[in-house]
Image (cartoon, rainbow, N blue to C red):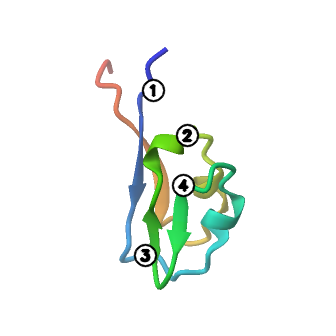
Amino acid sequence: MKNNKKLVINTAWCKGCGICSAFCPKQVLEVKAKVKIVNLDACIYCGQCEMRCPDYAIYLEDTNNDA
């Protein structure tokens, strides 16, 4: 089954709290001043980062165009 999700970060909204990277089971994210993707190939698109971000700065976007 093909993955129809894309991990998106809005760095303008990120305050660098690190919650998203702490809950990521595959260490896809890293936070210095702001969050960044460091290992996208390992991402399982579980949505933990999106659910935990208090500022809605990271989310999974549906890339399926079959609307």
Q: Distance between the residues labelled 1 and 4?
A: 16 Å
Measured along the vertical axis of the image, is residue 54 above or below residue 50?
Answer: below
Residue visible at 62% across and 41% down in the picture? 46
Comparing marks 1 and 4, which lies closer to the viewer?
4
Look at the image and tell me in which quarter the C terminus lies.
Answer: top left
| Residue type at tag 2 | Tyr
Q: Distance between the residues labelled 2 and 1?
A: 8 Å
Q: Counting other residues with Cα less than 10 Å from the Cα at mark 2, is it few (<14), some (14-19), or many (20 or more)?
A: some
| Among numbered discs 4 and 3, the one appearing first in the sequence | 3
Q: Circle 2 — which element?
A: loop
- Percent of width and height locating residue 49: 60, 56
The residue under label 3 is 13
Q: How far apart are marks 2 and 3 (CA)?
A: 21 Å
Comparing marks 4 and 3, which lies closer to the viewer?
4
| Among numbered discs 1 and 4, the one appearing first in the sequence | 1
- Percent of width and height locating residue 40: 45, 48
Q: Residue 28 carries which label?
A: 4
In this orientation, which residue lies closer to the viewer: 26 or 1?
A: 26
| Residue type at tag 3 | Trp
The residue under label 2 is 45
The residue under label 1 is 3
